[in-house]
């Protein structure tokens, strides 16, 4: 009885602190801290793609399994698996081992969606297969894949967008510490006014009131489940802006309709069957 109570308290503490989600299969995903920026390792699913030639961050990515990281296909243009590496557990990318959870992994294979178009960035999604398994902890772990949101479009939802914002194409500020902003998913028709090429496998976001202008492409857009607080990977930042008072919204790859492609192309992955 006492052991059980202790377990319950520990479980409660964990779920409050990290939004830990444990399913029947003893699998957890989507845990993180919802607090402000500056909470180191607050988003254990976040990964960085490092360009090994320049030692700069090329793009963001998100951990979906011990061997797989999801990113934008366009981030892999002109690269091969040996010219990039994946960093996990990082915070300030100016110092290579800024946290004790930081780890660097080599990439074995790029798996790019066959329908990816560099013209309108449709199907801008790719899997990176790592050459060895990540070590999961409360500071490095997978995002939840949105199986339970497969048939929903979620307009209006409030999404957490993560990135290091080092690709400064618009003259906005850059920063070395992982940042987050909140973005709203815009209705498709409303977004087509600004982005006429928008397809059904893309969605737009705006970020009212945030002063950050640039964010790392390939990074995740997360939806915090209302019941459990678990973070689900709803989108991948693909093109456009994440900028206050800007008519040009962020354009993102819509993950739920691409789940079948993800699952088929990562046959040895172990996803949480969270419903
Ligand atoms: C469940 O997870 C715990 C903590 O990671 C681990 O110690 C245990 O072996 C796991 N149980 C099974 C059945 O996988
Ligand atoms: C990590 O980055 C923070 C914020 O930039 C800095 O204050 C801290 O000294 C760094 N720690 C290490 C171990 O590099
Ligand atoms: C992963 O790749 C690196 C660099 O090519 C290599 O040194 C290492 O042995 C590889 N690890 C595995 C498990 O294949
Ligand atoms: C989504 O729709 C398909 C086809 O209508 C259905 O088979 C499936 O169960 C639905 N999935 C969810 C999670 O609602
Ligand atoms: C989005 O969610 C965050 C976290 O709950 C909250 O702080 C923020 O105010 C929300 N934004 C809007 C516009 O609802």
Image (cartoon, rainbow, N blue to C red):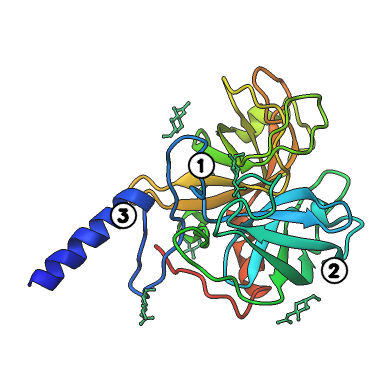
Is 264 rendered above or below residue 162? below
Whether ligand 1 has any atom under 8 Å from the Cβ at mark 3 is answered as no
Q: Residues within 10 Å of mark 1 (few under 14, many from 20)?
A: some
Quarter that holds the N terminus: bottom left
Whether ligand 3 has any atom under 8 Å from the Cβ at mark 2 is answered as yes
Toward the right, the furthest residue is 78
Q: Secondary structure at mark 1?
A: loop
Q: Secondary structure at mark 2?
A: helix
Quarter that holds the C terminus: bottom left
Q: Residues within 10 Å of mark 3 (few under 14, many from 20)?
A: some
Where residue 189 sits: x, y (%)? 65, 31
Q: Which residue is mark 2?
A: 82
Nearer the observer: mark 1 or 3; the answer is 3
Q: Which residue is mark 1?
A: 154
The quarter of the picture where residue 165 lies is: top right
Is 241 rendered above or below residue 235? above
Q: Which residue is mark 3?
A: 15
Pick whichever of labels 2 and 1 is earlier in the sequence: 2
Where residue 17 sits: x, y (%)? 34, 49
Where residue 39 sits: x, y (%)? 48, 41
Pick whichever of labels 2 and 3 is earlier in the sequence: 3
Give me the residue at 71% from left, 42% from top: 216
Rendered-image quarter of ligand 2: top right
Position of 65 with respect to 23 (left or right) is right
Give me the residue at 75% from left, 38% from top: 166
Give me the residue at 49% from left, 61% from top: 147
Position of 81 with respect to 213 (left or right) is right
């Amino acid at each position: 009885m006492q052991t059980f109570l202790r377990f319950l308290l520990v479980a409660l503490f964990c779920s409050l602190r990290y939004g830990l989600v444990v399913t029947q299969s003893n699998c957890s995903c989507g845990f993180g801290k919802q607090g402000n920026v500056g909470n180191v390792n607050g988003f254990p699913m976040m990964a960085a793609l490092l360009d090994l030639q320049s030692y700069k961050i090329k793009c963001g990515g998100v951990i979906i399994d011990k061997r797989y990281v999801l990113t934008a296909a366009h981030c892999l243009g002109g690269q091969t698996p040996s010219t990039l590496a994946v960093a996990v557990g990082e915070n300030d990318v100016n110092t290579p081992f800024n946290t004790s959870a930081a780890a660097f992994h080599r990439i074995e294979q790029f798996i790019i969606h066959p329908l990816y178009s560099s013209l309108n960035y449709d199907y801008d999604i790719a899997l990176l297969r790592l050459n060895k398994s990540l070590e999961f902890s409360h500071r490095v772990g997978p995002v939840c894949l949105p199986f339970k949101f497969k048939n929903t479009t979620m307009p209006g939802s409030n999404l957490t967008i993560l990135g290091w914002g080092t690709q400064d194409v618009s003259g906005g500020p850059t920063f070395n510490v992982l940042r987050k902003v909140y973005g709203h998913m815009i209705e498709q028709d409303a977004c087509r006014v600004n982005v006429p090429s928008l397809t059904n496998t893309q969605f737009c976001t705006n970020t009212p009131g945030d002063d950050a202008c640039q964010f790392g492409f390939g990074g995740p857009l997360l939806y915090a489940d209302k019941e459990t607080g678990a973070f689900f990977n709803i989108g991948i930042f693909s093109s456009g802006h994440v900028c206050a008072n800007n008519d040009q919204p962020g354009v993102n790859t819509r993950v739920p309709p691409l789940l079948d492609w993800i699952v088929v192309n990562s046959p040895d992955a172990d996803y949480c069957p969270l419903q």
